[in-house]
């Protein structure tokens, strides 16, 4: 059991670091090289389909609205994000992705899909269900630290 704990811990650390490193490296080689990994994750949090307020996105990223506003200003200048005033209440501003932002979002999602498919390669349904349960347990544990 103790050996498994060490192995799983090392694999989790390695996987986390590998994902960040690959995402950063691929970003630098792509047409989106003007973005940082943090900016890419901000775009991911804004999402493709539902316009969100700054508060909603900040909460999702676990950062302050002020910190997010600075990031959004940069992403607007780089033409990845747009601010959209609500028709119902002109005081309310929602965030959405521009055409360039939606393209980056789809490219990034494709990487994630390929990564998950690689994880599930040669797995039986019971094994993938066990993985889902394990990841759900990890997620719930981490939520306690947010």
Image (tube, rainbow, N blue to C red):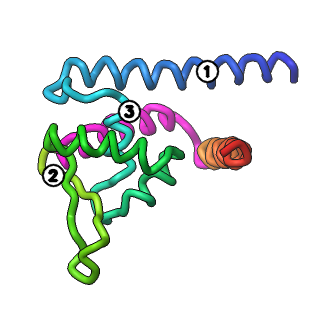
The quarter of the picture where the N terminus appears is top right
Residue under label 1: 13
Task: Please tell me the numbered disc located at residue 38.
Answer: 3
The residue carrying pointer 2 sits among few (fewer than 14), some (14 to 19) or many (20 or more) residues within 10 Å by Cα, namely some
Magenta span:
101-125
- Foreground mark, 3 or 1, reads 3
Q: Residues within 10 Å of mark 1 (few under 14, many from 20)?
A: few
| Residue sticking out furthest to the right | 1
Judging depth in this view, the residue of 70 and 133 nearest the camera is 70
Residue 98 disc label: 2
Q: Earlier in the sequence, mark 1 or mark 2?
A: 1
Label 1 secondary element: helix
User: Residue placed at 50% from the left, 44% from the top?
Assistant: 63
Q: Nearer the viewer, mark 1 or mark 2?
A: 2
Q: Are marks 3 and 1 in contact (CB under 8 Å)?
A: no
Residue drawn at x 53%, y 46% as measured from the top left? 62
From the viewer's side, name the closer residue of 80 and 18: 80
- Residue 134 place in picture, x, y as percent: 69, 42
Task: Pick whichever, 41 or 57, lies toward us.
Answer: 57
């Amino acid at each position: 059991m103790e050996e498994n704990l060490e192995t799983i811990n090392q694999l989790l650390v390695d996987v986390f670091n590998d994902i960040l490193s690959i995402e950063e490296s691929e970003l630098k080689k792509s047409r989106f090289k003007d973005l940082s990994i943090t900016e890419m994750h901000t775009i991911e949090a804004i999402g493709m389909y539902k316009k969100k307020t700054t508060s909603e996105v900040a909460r999702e990223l676990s950062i302050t609205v002020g910190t997010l506003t600075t990031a959004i200003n940069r992403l607007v200048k780089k033409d990845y994000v747009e601010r959209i005033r609500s028709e119902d209440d002109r005081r309310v501003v929602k965030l959405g992705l521009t055409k360039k932002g939606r393209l980056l979002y789809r490219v990034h999602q494709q990487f994630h899909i390929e990564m998950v498919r690689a994880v599930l390669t040669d797995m039986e349904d019971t094994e993938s269900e066990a993985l889902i349960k394990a990841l759900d347990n990890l997620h719930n544990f981490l939520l306690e630290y947010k």
